[in-house]
Image (spheres, rainbow, N blue to C red):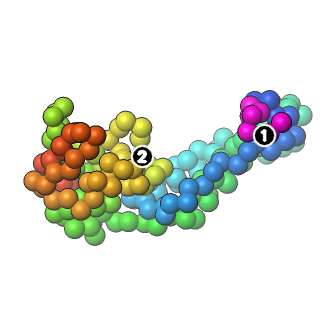
Amino acid sequence: MSRAFVKEDAQGPDEDPPERPLSDQPNYCTPRGIRLYQDEEARLLNELEPFSGAQDDPKLKRRKRELERDLRWVRARLESVIPVDPANQPKDQIRFGARAVLKGPSGERAVRIVGEDEAEEGGEYLSYAAPFAQALLGLKAGQSADWSGETWTVDSIAYSA
């Protein structure tokens, strides 16, 4: 049977969990995104501390391996960071790091264009690689983008660290 059909919980204590996939997109990050990676690395290191000795408990062994896998992923993402300072972006256009307030038929919506790992599902933080973000990039206040049958007009653009 393919590993794709085996639940991670079903693995034995001596098996390594599958690696977390790394994106093939450039890892552009705002200063906030870099801090999020650093905070996650510190949290994982802190959570790994009690596992430093040999573990006889299979569940503890598995948990340690999962934490080590996650730490490898965070460190790989940190190594691939391409920092983008929002202060260096054009203030009159939506670019990476911008917070834009949009007006559309369903009301007002604020979005921030950020790195992939900073994005929030359904939230204000939108990955630069998302199609909606791609439709907004380069727009200035007063300009509009059509998205999913709705027209969104840029009301304001701001940048902060």
Q: Which residue is located at x 43 percent, y 59 percent?
A: 29
Q: Residue at x 27, y 59 (%)?
A: 137
- Residue under the image location 13 percent in, 55 percent down: 143
In the image: residue 123, left or right of residue 58 = left
Can residue 152 be seen at all in this image of the molecule?
A: yes
Which residue is label 1 attached to?
3
Q: Which residue was labeled with disc 2? A: 119
From the top left corner, tell me how far across and down residue 64 is, in percent: 76, 41
On whether residue 118 falls in the magenta region, the answer is no
Residue 142, given in percent of the width and then of the height, sits at 10, 53
Placement of the N terminus among the 4 image quadrants: top right
Q: Residues within 10 Å of mark 1 (few under 14, many from 20)?
A: few
Q: Quadrant of residue 8?
A: top right
Would you identify the image quadrant in which residue 139 lies? bottom left
Comparing 92 with 63, the one in front is 92
In the rendered structure, which segment of residues is drawn in magenta?
A: 1-8
The amino acid type, in three-letter code, at marker 1 is Arg
Locate residue 103 relative to residue 99 in the image: left or right: left
- Left or right: where does residue 149 sit relative to residue 14? left
Labels 2 and 1: the sequence-earlier one: 1
